[in-house]
Amino acid sequence: MKITAKQYAKSLYQAVQGKDNSQIKDAINNFFNILIQNNDMAKAEEIVVEFEKVWNIEYEIIEAEVVSAKELDKNIVKLLNDYIVKLSGAKKVLLKQKIDKNILGGVVIKYEDKILDGSLRTKMEALKINMIK
C-alpha cells in the first residue's frame, strides 16, 4: 500500500514534535531517507503543503487573504488581522495582502471557507439591482 502525502506529513509532524534542533535535524534526515527508499521523493512538495496544514491545525493558525484596491496602511492591516482572529477563534493569522483595482475600494477578506465582501464594487452592484427592482 502506498503512503499518501498526508500520511507522510502527519508522521513527520509526530517525529519532530517536542524535539530540540539536533533531534529535529536527525528526524528530517531519517524522513528523507525513508522517502528515498520508498521512491516517493516526487511527493516532497505535496508533503510540505500537508505538513503546514497539520502544523497550522495543531497551533490554531489560519491563513487569510485581504484583497483591496490599493496597499493598506499597517494600522489597517493590524486591525483586520485582529478582526479575523476574533471571528475565527484562531490564535494566529497568516495574512496575505492582494491588490485588485477592480474592487474599486473597501476590502474582501477570505479565510477558511468564508468570504467577507466589503468591496465598493459589490455594494454598487447591489445598489444597481435594488434600483432596477
Image (tube, rainbow, N blue to C red):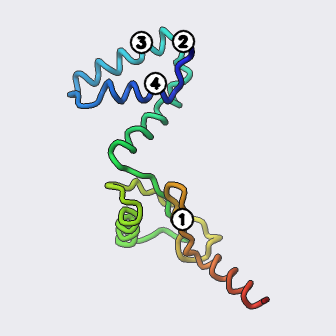
Q: Amino acid at mark 4?
A: Tyr
Whichever of labels 1 and 2 marks the residue nearer the N terminus, that label is 2
Q: Check the picture and name the quadrant holding the N terminus.
A: top right
Give the percent coordinates (x, y) of residue 51: 43, 34
What secondary structure is marked by label 2? Answer: loop
**Mark 1 or mark 4, which has the lower sequence index?**
4
Q: Earlier in the sequence, mark 4 or mark 3?
A: 4
**Is residue 11 rendered to the left or right of residue 100?**
left
- Residue 9 locus on image (x, y percent): 44, 29
Task: Judge depth for marks 1 and 4 and give the one in front.
Answer: 4
In the drawing, what numbered circle is on residue 67?
A: 1
119 vs 21, left or right, is right
Kindly identify which numbered label has been placed on residue 8: 4
Q: Secondary structure at mark 3?
A: helix
Alpha carbon distance from label 3 to label 2:
10 Å
- Mark 1, mark 2: which one is toward the viewer? 2
Residue 39 marker: 2
Q: Which residue is mark 3?
A: 33
For marks 1 and 3, the one nearer the N-term is 3
Secondary structure category for the residue under label 1: strand
Residue at figure coordinates x 38%, y 56% from the top left: 93
Residue found at x 32% / y 24%? 15
21 shown above or below 63: above
Label 1 – label 2 distance at C-alpha? 41 Å
Residue furthest toward the right? 132
Give the residue type that dot 2 points to: Asn
For marks 4 and 3, give the CA distance: 13 Å
Q: Residue 28 in the image: x percent, y percent?
A: 35, 21
